[in-house]
Image: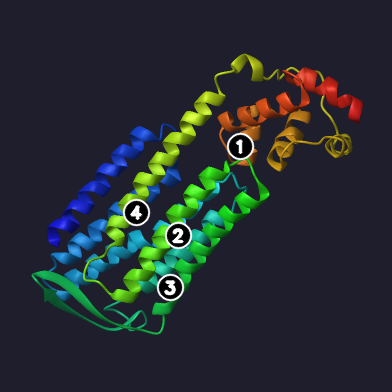
Amino acid sequence: MISLYGITFAVSVLMIAVCFFVDKKHDKWLLLLFSSVAVCDSGYLLLSVSKTLEDALWANRVAYLGNVFLPFFLFMMITNLSRLKIPKHLPAVLTVINTAMLLVACSAGILPIYYKDVSLTFVDGVAVLVKEHGPLHNVYKIYLFAYFAAMVGIIIYTMIKKTDAPIKHSMFLAFVVIGNIAIWLVENIIHAGFEFLAISYIVTEGLILLLYGILQDYEKTESTEPEKVQEIHTAPTSFTDTQIDNILKNIDGISEREKEVLVYLLKNTKRKEIAENLFVTESTIKKHTSSIYKKLKVTNRNELFDAVSKLV
């Protein structure tokens, strides 16, 4: 059992290196997600080889450090992949909530709020914590359920609203999230001697890397037409908010996300600024711009201005 924990920890560290290789853009949420898995698996390993209750409690806290922040990083990663615009202050607010949850989960051995009582036993030479749940233990379950529900909600919203994120990617993410929920529920029901989440996390990492690889190949393909989507930032004019509203009312066939990009284009905003305002990459904005130009049968911003000026 100890060797299995050692293998999962080693693989989780290796997956961080693989992440750097696959994700050329070095998405910070993806890297943090993979790091949290490694922290979690290190905690499981340290717990299995603990000799004293104090050592086991500290190992348990390390595992919770990874477990508590992991759903947060996964949530942020899913919002990015779903191309969902979220409030700027949301990550900071969630970080405060995550930290509070971590402090509660790490209170074992100090306060009887998460565990009323905890002791150490050994099963086939492997250290195991025997826990009696305290009054705030269910808060952690609510915490996880809230994150899982939010992730599933985002994925369903993406699929129903038909945003710019492809449906197959949303379904892929749904499979990843629901799979982890299922494993977590089974573990809570059967109370197995091994933390199967340690393995499921690694499987999840592999699936996510596969998705990221597909997405980056897709964006690379979309960017092979630089001449067609080249933006001319020297366009001679821009439109007022009232004019833009009139233009949008008379344009059909573009998605809600494309309308957001079109608003910035009509205000003569540079691609980099559009990407920053919409929390996406310039490559994504280029893709949206290409789609808008194609649907409106223009090839650059000047032609776009000429075309939509008839709709004001």
Identity of the residue drawn at 72% across and 42% down? 256
Circle on res. 36: 4
Q: Secondary structure at mark 1?
A: helix
To which quarter of the image does residue 123 belong?
Answer: bottom left
Q: Secondary structure at mark 4?
A: helix
Disc 4 from disc 3: Cα separation: 19 Å
Q: Nearer the viewer, mark 4 or mark 3?
A: 3
Dot placed on the residue nearer the N-terminal end, 2 or 1: 2
Q: What is the x, y in percent for residue 34?
A: 35, 48
Disc 4 from disc 1: Cα separation: 27 Å
Residue 147, relative to residue 230: is it above or below? below
Q: Secondary structure at mark 2?
A: helix
Which quarter of the image is occupied by the C terminus?
A: top right
Name the foreground residue: 101 vs 302: 302
Q: Amino acid at mark 1?
A: Glu
Q: What is the x, y in percent for residue 98?
A: 45, 63
Determine if residue 230 is in view: no
Q: Nearer the viewer, mark 2 or mark 3?
A: 2
- 140 left or right, relative to 161: left
Furthest residue to the top?
A: 227
Dot placed on the residue nearer the N-terminal end, 2 or 4: 4
Which quarter of the image is occupied by the N terminus?
A: bottom left
Name the foreground residue: 256 vs 271: 256
Residue designated by label 3: 141
Cβ–Cβ under 8 Å for marks 1 and 3: no
Circle on res. 276: 1
